[in-house]
Image: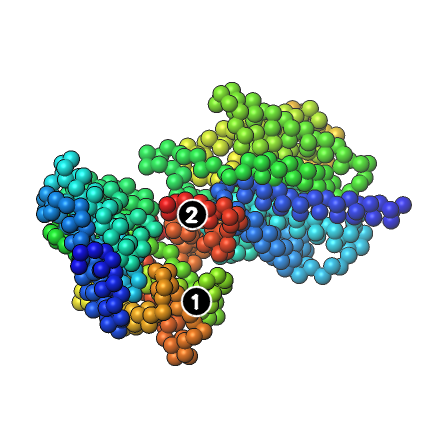
Amino acid sequence: METYESIRVWKELNIANFLDDIVSLNDFHDQVMLKVLEVASKKIGASPAPCDFSWFITGSGGRLEQSLISDQDHGIAYEIANDENDLYFKVLGTEISYGLYEVGYPYCEGKVMSSNPLWCKSNIDWDTQLAFWVDDESWESIRYLQIFYDARVLYGNVEFIQRLKTYVHEYQLQHPILLSRFTANVEYVKNVIGPVGQLLVERQGLYKGCVNLKYAGFLPYVNAIRLLSIKEGIVDTSTLDRMAHLNRIKEYEGILKDTERNFKDLLVFRLSLSQVESYADTHYLQVEKLTKTEQKDIKRIIKGGIKLHREVIAMMKKGGPNGI
Amino acid sequence: MEDVMYLMNSLWTMIAAILVIFMIGGFILLEAGSTRMKNAGHVAGKTIFTFGLASMVFWAVGYGFIFGGDANFFVGMTDFFYSGEIMEGAGLATTVFFVFQLAFAGIAVTIALGGFAERAKLSAYVIFTILFGIIVYPVIAHWVWGGGWLAEHGKQDFAGSTVVHLTGAMAALAATIILKPRIGKFNKDGSANNLAGHNQVYTALGVLILWVGWFGFNAGSTVSVDAAFFGYVALNTTLAAGAGAVAATLISWVVLGKSDIPTILNGALAGLVAITASCAFVDVWASVVIGLIAGVLVFYSARFFEKRKVDDPIYALSVHGAAGVWGTLSTGFFATPELASVGKPGLFYGGGWDQLGVQLMGVVSCGLFAFVVSYAILFIMKKVMGGIRVTEEEELMGLDMSEHGNYGYPEQMILEESKSLN
């Protein structure tokens, strides 16, 4: 495949074959994105790259949780900083973002993309960036660190990213305040369970009658499990893999009960949303169209996520210096 | 003739009650204008809600605790769930007196909740309004106005510099300490940033509404038209407000090089708060002096709290606290023998140190009680409710969205959101 257009056609023809299994679907997305990288590299010329580098994806892609349509979240770390390399990767990053867009991955609203200098840096600049983020403690910096922690290398040197994650883990061990800042950063949960246990759906607009699966379903699980992973220094990025590691730690036995099953069910629920036309569509579940059993299931999953999230936050605060 | 007096007293006090209730509108504009756009709808809505809730609490227990019979050291124990019964032989209708007092309780809690601004959960407002209305405000109001121990000592607090303003401010202080500063207020090195309010015109209109409402607050506290004394009280009130505004303008001009608008507005309010205790007890010239001192005091008080890293978005501590203390003490200096219908004349009128001592005792005991009990309430609430502050993410998105699901300025905020994304 030589053009973005041909990748897009190939993707659209084949993606339906992977819709019943989240692992193979994500594997397929990986292949598509790697092809985009290949075409992008060729398009800008000067292949091979002037130095060793790593191209990573983060967000749902990093966590292997992409559904049919997913926005792009990615970045680049390259070995040697000099003017020539800086320019090369800047151009490559911009081309990749454009290519992914052409193939059907919408631009990231938060600009977590290789085209953004914040996410395209030499190793030495990444060191400085991470050092700034861990020390800065602002809401934005901590949010960036959480995004970074979900980074998974799709192409190139895995070591570049691993090293930076280890740095975050070790810094956190020496500065417990960082863990409490991580905790505060993900404390918010969109509440969709009403006072009498009913599901609170969107009241108006395009998604009237829907429940927001991203904020109410996924994020409580993803954020809680990421927090525990940062604390324990688990480098895997998939939430299910992280759970598998955490399940081996006795301390978490109680809180993690049923979590894996709930989360797997949630992934299945989202995959069932195959009639989607935009990235936003993949977040919304029409409640009225569900059967009684499905409604009961989704409530169980959402409540399970909220409970897990609450317990993890409480556990972190107990150990942390400044709870409110 | 007696009938006419009864009706006139009732009518005047009813008008005053309406003016005091209208002050809630002043507080809405004051607080909304002094805070950021993303919290404006929340400020407006919660103020109406908490006034409603405070009214329920006052009807159920507040009134009985303050004015009821069979009193113990802290509160009275009759007249709960007031039935509307008219007391025989009173100078005005009991129903009118009840509504007038209810308005005061509502103002006190509104001041207290000012300390919650821009960061507390809505559920914290609900619980604190109830508990403040049961165990903080009624105790102090009973001590001073309901025949309690401070009343027996002859404490002078005509319309509530202590009872309403200092009590509210002490609860606000406890809240600001427990809630901690808003995100971005202080830098790591302790220096403060200016999280400017979004509409100074709102704040100024809020002050004007409060100024007008204060005629109900102070002049209405005569609860009588006898000898048209309310006119004298109103005269003192408005002069103190004017003097406060002038003094605050000048002091900020001299110290900062430019006159600071929030300080001007706070100066007027500080003058009003200070004269609240003394408006019926002092000469006209003294009310000007009291207002001038309050205007200067509020400027330095706001700087003091900021330096101590206490984040007080709407200056509740300086306007109601510092000026409330000064107002209460001021009668100890300026109360005249002719006007001191309660207590004794002040230091400057040959009354010696007695009255000043009583005033000081009142300030310390009421201030301490309000602070300690409010702090304890909030501390327990924090433990039981899993925190009383919204999460960082909610604070950044604004309480309009996090607590209510709608912006006070929908078009503007959606525009801001899209700007920040692109």
* B221 and B347: which is toward the camera: B221
Q: Residues within 10 Å of mark 1 (few under 14, many from 20)?
A: many
Residue placed most toward the observer, A1 or A319 = A1
- Where A9 sits versus B240, above or below? below
Residue depicted at x 18% and y 53%: A39
Query: Residue drawn 64% across and 43% down?
Result: B23
User: Where is residue B296 drawn, in percent x and y?
Assistant: 55, 26
- With B396 as the anchor, is A242 left or right in this view? left
Q: Quadrant of the N terminus of chain A?
A: bottom left
Q: Is residue B16 visible?
A: yes
Residue B218 placement: quadrant: top right
Badge number at residue B417: 2
**Extreme right residue here?**
B1
Q: Is residue A142 above or below residue B235?
A: below
In the shown orientation, is residue B224 left or right of residue B363? right
Where residue A314 sits: x, y (%)? 33, 59
Disc on res. A305: none
> Does dot 2 land on a helix, a strand or a loop?
helix
> Can see residue A229?
no
Q: Within 10 angstroms of label 2, few (less than 14), some, or many (20 or more) residues? A: few
Q: How is the image coloured?
A: rainbow
Measured as percent of width and height from the top left, residue B145 is found at: 66, 45
Which residue is painted at 42% across and 79% down in the image? A292
What is the chain identity of the residue bearing mark 1? A
Inspect the image, locate mark 1, and give the three-letter code of the amino acid beneath it. Answer: Cys
Within the image, what quadrant is residue A235 found in?
Answer: bottom left
Image coords of residue B131 (percent x, y): 53, 55
Where is mark 1, residue-wise?
A210
Q: Are marks 1 and 2 on the same chain?
A: no
Residue drawn at x 79%, y 48% is B10
